[in-house]
Amino acid sequence: MQLVKDVTSSANLTQEGPDAMAKQGPRKKLPKELAVINADNCTGCESCLEVCPVDCIELRTIDRGVKGSQSWCEIDLERCVGCEVCVHIPQKKSNPYELLVCPWDAIEMVPTVEVAQFVAQIGGPPEYIHENWDRLVGTAQHLAELKANS
């Protein structure tokens, strides 16, 4: 019980919203690759969201009026640790079969230095990318610059 008390009282944790356990502050290490979801291929089934160990995947939906709505999952690149669990289930190297998480093959691992280009091209519908440019592409570019300088 003492361990839980210490963890929840830590000053490095936020206390509200869906990110209640997300760490704040700079990363200790940037991953070589980050996961990017191709919004055109994503159906919003949330398979990836269920397996993510750091809860960095969120469902997004845009209402398109009479055309219905479009849903896709989006990865918060600042929280992604590049573990690849959203892409495939880790197994022994001797196992010749790969178990994919996304039934639509919409997730790919992208080198951190190239992630901004991928997010700008496939990270969501064009109007969504434009409206959220700083949060999506700006963040990706910042991470790419940090990785290039490390």
Image (spheres, grey):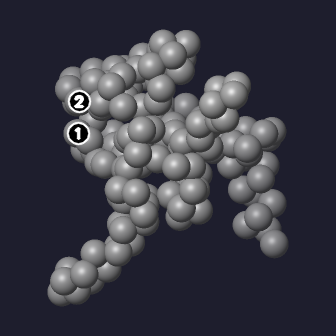
Which residue of the protein is positioned furthest toward the front in this rendering? 66
Residue, disc 1: 111
Taking the spot 36% from the left edge, 68% from the top edge, the residue there is 100
> Quick check: 102 left or right of 110?
right
In-front residue for pair 20/128: 128
Query: Around disc 1, counting alpha carbons within 10 Å, would you say few (fewer than 14), some (14 to 19), or many (20 or more)?
Result: some
Residue 97 is situated, as x and y percent measured from the top left of the image, at 25, 81
Please give left or right for residue 93 compared with residue 37 in the image. Answer: left
Looking at the image, is 124 positioned above or below residue 16? above
Instruction: State the CA–CA distance, disc 2 to disc 1.
Output: 5 Å
SS type, badge 1: strand
Name which residue type carries label 2: Glu
Number of dots carrying numbers: 2
**Which residue is at a point 49% across and 41% down the rendered structure image?**
75
Residue 119, compared with residue 92, is above or below; it is: above
Quick check: 131 above or below 24?
above
Give the position of the C terminus as an image quadrant.
top left
SS class, disc 2: helix
Query: Quadrant location of the N terminus?
Result: bottom right
Could you tell me the amino acid type at mark 1?
Pro
Which residue, given by chain and number where applicable, does mark 2 sit on? 114
Q: Is residue 90 above or below residue 33?
A: below
Residue 64 point in image, percent of width and height: 65, 26
Residue neighbourhood size for the residue with mark 2, other residues' Cα within 10 Å, grouped as few (<14), some (14–19), many (≥20): some
**Dividing the picture into quarters, in which one does residue 119 lie?**
top left
Residue pictured at 26% horizontal, 41% vertical: 110
Q: Are marks 2 and 1 in contact (CB under 8 Å)?
A: yes
| Residue situated in front as seen by the camera: 96 or 84 | 96
Is 122 on the left or on the right of 68, as rendered? left
Q: Position of residue 105 (x, y in %)?
A: 35, 56
Q: Is residue 150 visible?
A: yes
**Which residue ends up furthest to the bottom in the rendered image?**
94
